[in-house]
Amino acid sequence: MVRAAEPNDTASRPLPPLSPMTVALPWYEAEDWPVLHSMFLERDSVPDSYERWRLRALEAERRYTVDGYKVVRVVVHPEALLEWCTARGRVIDLKARHDYAQSRLEQITF
């Protein structure tokens, strides 16, 4: 017997769409930085040092916030990023990292 979902039965309901004002910011952890940096297609234009990258990311986060966006840091781990890009035939460039973060954000329940 199949029963109708109760009004408070949230497990069967789809998640609401993300606000267009939400930005997924790829966020890297210091211990993953050397491996991640070596994977980046455009690594020559990405800071070698984690601290320099972090300062750039904090500035980008600040600019998004000032512009009215809600910023969600999405932690990116090397293995997961590589798996995601490989499955989609993507190179690991800036666009792919942002697309990966966005796809992870869409899986998060608020």
Image: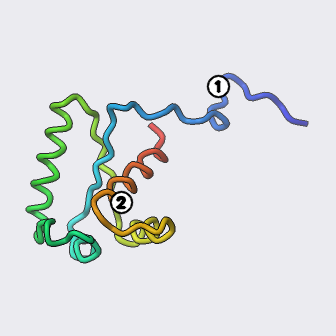
Residue furthest top in the image: 7
Quadrant (top left/top right/bottom left/bottom right) for the C terminus: top left
The residue that mark 1 highlights is: 8
Residue toward you, 66 or 9: 66
Q: Looking at the picture, how far across and down is residue 89, in whole percent?
A: 46, 69
Callout 1 environment at 10 Å: few (<14), some (14 to 19), or many (20+)? few
Q: Looking at the picture, how far across and down is residue 65, in whole percent?
A: 19, 34
Q: Select label 1 or label 2 by which is in front.
A: 2
- The amino acid beneath tag 2 is Ala
First-in-chain label (1 vs 2): 1
At x 67%, y 30%, the residue is 9
Q: Is residue 50 above or below residue 64?
A: below
At x 14%, y 48%, the residue is 58
Q: Looking at the picture, how far across and down is residue 41, in whole percent?
A: 26, 71
Residue toward you, 68 or 51: 68
The residue that mark 2 highlights is: 96
Instruction: Describe residue 7's horizontal placement relative to residue 66 as left or right.
Output: right
Q: Is residue 35 above or below residue 80?
A: below
Considering the numbered disc 2 on the image, is that residue within a helix, a strand or a loop? helix
Considering the numbered disc 1 on the image, is that residue within a helix, a strand or a loop? loop
Q: Give the distance between the C-alpha atoms of the residues marked 1 and 2, in whole angstroms.
A: 37 Å
